[in-house]
């Protein structure tokens, strides 16, 4: 694995180079995340062969406030387009109480709050890079009916 990630499992050459290009997309690094603060295995919601959560993960409310502040967005921003190592997609804000995971460490049950839950549909290739990069945040836009 090189510093960008492991692209060896991608057999399609065009997709392999598209994955490499993902590492160079325009984004702003917000912070380095600790591996215990990210979950890469949050399940997708799938029904009848359709994935309803494709590319959409979760971010804790407290981390979202930090990201909003560092990115210059309103504190109540509800979603972010992100890149974390080999993962990309959108993170929507969930209350901190819903971002708790149960783990077993040394035969004891431990409850841990995580900041980011990524779905398997978001992880495009394995990478050891845990820098949290934001492409943009959700902003208000006005909609029109039958213009």
Image: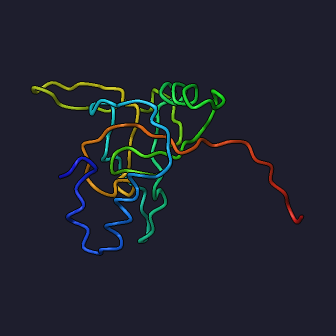
Residue 27 on image: x %, y %: 50, 44
Whether 76 is drawn above or below 14: the answer is above
> Residue 139 appears in which quarter of the rendering?
top right
Residue 65 on image: x %, y %: 55, 26
- Judge from the rendering whether residue 6 lies leftward or rightward of residue 20; answer left or right: left
Whether 146 is drawn above or below 120: the answer is below
The quadrant of the picture occupied by the C terminus is: bottom right
What residue is at 39 percent from the left and 41 percent from the top? Answer: 117
What residue is at 24 percent from the left and 43 percent from the top? Answer: 128
- Judge from the rendering whether residue 85 lies leftward or rightward of residue 68; answer left or right: left
- Colour mapping used in the image: rainbow
- Judge from the rendering whether residue 41 lies leftward or rightward of residue 9; answer left or right: right
Of the pair 44 and 83, the residue shown nearer to us? 83
What residue is at 60 percent from the left and 38 percent from the top? Answer: 78
> Residue 137 appears in which quarter of the rendering?
top right
Q: How many marks?
A: 0
Of the pair 70 and 88, the residue shown nearer to us? 70
Outermost residue toward the left?
106
Of the pair 51 and 84, the residue shown nearer to us? 84
Residue 95 on image: x %, y %: 51, 30
Of the pair 96 and 47, the residue shown nearer to us? 96
What residue is at 76 percent from the left and 47 percent from the top? Answer: 141
Residue 71 on image: x %, y %: 57, 32
Whether 39 is drawn above or below 62: the answer is below
Outermost residue toward the right?
147
């Amino acid at each position: 694995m090189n510093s960008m990630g492991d692209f060896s499992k991608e057999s399609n050459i065009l997709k392999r180079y598209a994955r490499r290009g993902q590492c160079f997309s325009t984004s702003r690094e917000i912070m380095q995340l600790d591996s215990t603060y990210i979950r890469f295995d949050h399940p997708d919601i799938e029904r009848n062969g359709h994935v309803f959560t494709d590319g959409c993960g979760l971010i804790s409310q407290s981390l979202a406030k930090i990201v909003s502040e560092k990115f210059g967005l309103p504190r109540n921003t509800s979603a972010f387009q992100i890149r974390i190592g080999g993962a990309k997609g959108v993170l929507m804000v969930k209350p901190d109480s819903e971002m708790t995971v149960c783990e077993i460490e040394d035969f004891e049950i431990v409850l841990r709050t995580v900041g980011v839950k990524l779905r398997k549909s978001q992880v495009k290739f394995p990478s050891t890079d845990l820098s949290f990069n934001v492409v943009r945040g959700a902003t208000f836009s006005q909609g029109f009916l039958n213009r």
